[in-house]
Image: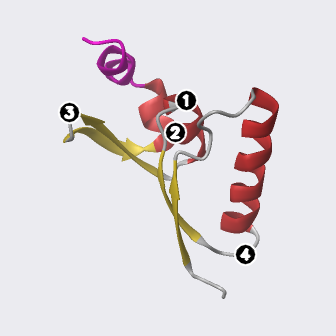
Amino acid sequence: MNPEILLVDEPSIGLEPRFIDMVFEILDDLQNKEGKTIIMVEQNAKKGLEFADIGYVLVSGELAIAGKGDDLLKNPKVGELFLGG
């Protein structure tokens, strides 16, 4: 099997920080060296947005903000949403 698209659900959940970094390095290799498209759900907002080309921030299942991962990392509204307003 050699899928073009990978669906990744919470790759960092329950892992020690050093293993989280390893998982994201593997995902980065799959994306950048093997040309895979990765669709990811990740509650570790910082790690997920650092990885994302495009990010979507959901609040109670509704789209709150969308944009480039780097832009969302810099957007203070993202932090407000994750801290409850």
Asked if residue 42 is positioned above or below residue 84 in the image, the reply reads below
Nearer to us in this view, 79 or 24: 24
Q: Are marks 2 and 1 in contact (CB under 8 Å)?
A: yes
Which amino acid type is marked by label 1?
Lys
- Whichever of labels 2 and 4 marks the residue nearer the N terminus, that label is 4
Q: Which residue position holds label 2?
A: 49
Please tell me whether mark 4 or mark 3 is closer to you in this view. 3
At horizontal 59% and vertical 37% (from top left) the residue drawn is: 13
Q: Quadrant of the N terminus?
A: bottom right
Disc 3/disc 2 C-alpha distance (Å) = 19 Å
At horizontal 44% and vertical 36% (from top left) the residue drawn is: 71
Disc 1/disc 3 C-alpha distance (Å) = 19 Å
- Give me the disc on residue 46: 1
Which amino acid type is marked by label 4?
Glu
Q: Are marks 3 and 2 in contact (CB under 8 Å)?
A: no
| Mark 2 burial class by Cα count in 10 Å: few <14, some 14-19, many 20+ | many
Residue with the most extreme front position: 14
| Mark 1 burial class by Cα count in 10 Å: few <14, some 14-19, many 20+ | some
Which amino acid type is marked by label 2?
Leu
Judged left or right of residue 43, residue 32 is: right
Asked if residue 57 is positioned above or below residue 81 in the image, the reply reads below
Q: Position of residue 12 (x, y in %)?
A: 62, 39
Please tell me whether mark 3 or mark 2 is closer to you in this view. 3
- Whichever of labels 4 and 3 marks the residue nearer the N terminus, that label is 4
Q: Which residue position holds label 3?
A: 60
Disc 1/disc 4 C-alpha distance (Å) = 24 Å
**Secondary structure found at label 3:** loop
Please provide the residue range marked out in magenta.
Answer: 75-85
